[in-house]
Amino acid sequence: MYLKSIELSGFKSFAKKSELNFSSKVSAIVGPNGSGKSNIAEAFRFVLGEQSIKSLRGKKGEDLIFNGAGELPRGNRASVKVVFDNSSKFLPLDFETVTIERVVHRDSVNEYLINGSQVRLRDVIELLASAHIGSSGHHIISQGEADRVLNASIKERKSMIEEALGLKMYQYKKQESERKLVKTRENIEQVGSLRREIMPHIRFLKKQVEKVQKTIEMKEELQKEALEYCCREDEYINRTTNRLNIEKSPLLEKEKSLENELNEAKAVLEGAKNKDIKSEKLISLEKSLHDTREEKDKLFRDFGRLDGEISSLARMVKKQEEVAHSLDHKTVTLSSVEEVSSKIEDQIKQVKNSGNIEELVKSLDVISTFLTDFIDQNKDKIDMSLIADAQKDIENLKESKKQIEDSLEEIKNRENKLSKEYSELKEAIDKEKDTNRDAEKAVFRIMAESQEVRSKLHSLNLEEETLKLLKEDFKRELTELGMLLGTHVLQFQSLSFDFNEARTLQEERRRKIEKIKIRLEDAGGLGGSDVVKEFTEATERDAFLEKEITDLEKSASSLTELIKDLDTRLSVEFKTGLDKINTQFKEYFAVMFGGGEAKLSVTVPVKKKKKDTDLSLDEDDIEVPEMIEEEEGIEIEVNLPKKKVKGLMMLSGGERALTSIALLFAISQVNPPPFIILDETDAALDEANSKKYADMIENLSKYSQLIVITHNRETMSRAGILYGVTMGMGGGSKLLSVAFEEAVSVAK
Ligand code: ATP
């Protein structure tokens, strides 16, 4: 036996503390009408956590507190305490005795206590549910509610039976799993849409990162090429400078000594007494030729310089053209941008006040056309201004070069004329074979030699000129590369290569470097590390979300699995439970009615969609109804002995009471609750049936402890303990333990 006692204090009509001990399998509570017996049944509901005030016959919490009667003043609180023997641990708590207490105060505040410790309502409900006891329980049958199971709809009936079979736990679990599943699916959807939202951004970042990666690769390639190029170029310049110096210096010395010799020879000729016309002519011719050749050299140098400048400018033009043709380096004028911007603004202004979505969409199309037109117009436009300037410079330089060429032509003619005169004079002098002409011959020799020296020096000078330009180019290239790669990167001095290669290879290298530089400029200056960092973060976040979806999907499928399992379990256990109940029901029914048959069956109702539910007597009015399947429920079929009555509707009041008692007892026996409270369930029975009822009570008490509130003598006779409830003189219910005979009189 699980139920030990109940104590009421200030609860409803029980002003004073009253305790009922249930040490017997069947306890009966007897007393006259209005003495407070049903208040005891309600005290059970109350302490077990009932939340519906209505089912406690009140309107508000206050109605449960003793309201004063006679001499007794009203109380401020009502409390009910129920004590269970838990030595079998039917309640999952490690105590031999479990006390559950509920207190309600005038301000409707409720307190719940388990073994004296304050707890939440939820804790009480969970504790009791585990032992198959609930507040609204099937095991507390209130007065007049005995045939509730017959009056209920088939769906309610099913729910009652499920509760009695202890299947509610599974249903709560199933409902909770379903709720979780819905929530999980929502989360999956949310995370999915979050992923979809960030996807375009990730794609954009990925492209940027790829560009950055390409830029890095290009830079690496450029650096490799540039290092070799610079190292070789530097080496070439140094070598050439040295060679030129070495080759030049003996020539310069020779030139100087020849000049001295010439001066000496000229001095001889000048000083000679027999100075003749030929000598004078020779001296003047030598001077003219010298001056002419000086002038020619100067012109050649200028020519070389101009040539260098022209080719350097031409290179620049070529580079500018390549840049100008690349799509990423289009320049557009501010005025053209302002023009398209004002067109867009006008369009927006126009549509802004219309408030018409269609207009707005049209307008967006117009704006889009503005922009594509603008791009198309500028796509093939090339900024020629820089190129044009350089080309103009080239033209000017070419003009100067032409002038120099003309002057050179003229000077060459002059030189040729002078050379011719000089040769003729030399021939004439040679013919004379005069020893006095030694000085003159020396002049001829010196001039021939110095002409040779001069021409060698001339070509060396040209080389030097070219080298100078090369050096300038190299300096510029170094600056540019330094800006692109960082000066620290260009540490080529320590490198070494096989320097004996054709100069054309170095040219190829230069062209390759130029190409990479242009590609790099096209790629634009991307804020590399920031983009990479953002991309990494974004992909990490995406991966996290992906994992979250996988986890959520996993938990969704395990929830689905759980729901399926619970469904199977519910349906299997319900079916076996129902079969067992049917066996008992059939037996109890036969006992009660002395024969006949009764059965519970599962039914799936069909409902007419059309409103017309009553059958019309006029057949023409009958419409063929559309059927909708509903949730299944429980139908009760009865077959009384010796009567043709089959439907529940046709039973008499007493027959209804008997049927419902039979069913109630059948259900209770299949899944016995620790205790059952029956509040005047036997009220409608005649003497013969009262006896059968009392027999069944006795039978049922083998499975559950019974507390019966009754006026029925037969029922009382089966109780081990009898409590009498009376309305005291001072007001309020009074409790007394009574003997059977006393009970019979008290009940009256
Ligand atoms: P019956 O045999 O007719 O069913 P009963 O013994 O079951 O009667 P109850 O319905 O339990 O009687 O008790 C009703 C009595 O309790 C009424 O007299 C009612 O005035 C009294 N009562 C109910 N609530 C309070 C309250 N808050 N304060 C004082 N008395 C109350």
Image (tube, rainbow, N blue to C red):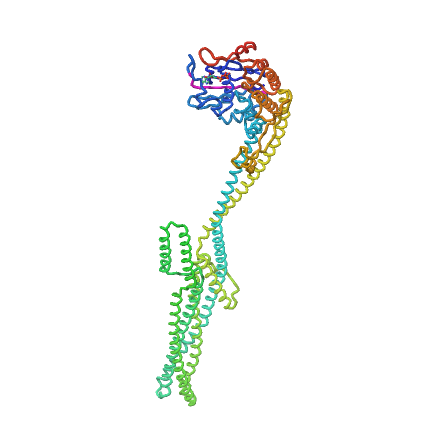
Q: Position of residue 525 (x, y in %)?
A: 44, 56
**Residues shaded magenta:** 74-87
Between residue 211 and residue 193, name the one nearer to us. Answer: 193
- Residue at left offset 41%, top offset 56%: 366
**Spot occupied by residue 128 in the image (x, y as percentages of width and height):** 54, 25
| Image position of 184 with respect to 100: above or below | below
Quadrant of residue 343 within the rendered picture:
bottom left
Say which quarter of the image contains residue 255.
Answer: bottom left
Can residue 733 be seen here? The reply is yes
Q: Is residue 31 magenta?
A: no
Q: Main secondary structure of the magenta part?
A: strand
Reply yes or no: does residue 77 show up in magenta.
yes
Q: Is residue 302 above or below residue 731?
A: below
Using the image as rendered, state which of residue 335 and residue 17 is in the foreground: 17
Q: Nearer the viewer, residue 74 or 468?
A: 74
Residue 542 horizontal side relative to residue 309, left or right: right
Residue 207 position in % (x across, y down): 48, 53
Which is nearer the eye, 196 or 388? 196
x 47%, y 63%: residue: 515
Residue 494, position in %: x, y?
A: 49, 59
Q: Quick one: quadrant of the N terminus?
A: top right
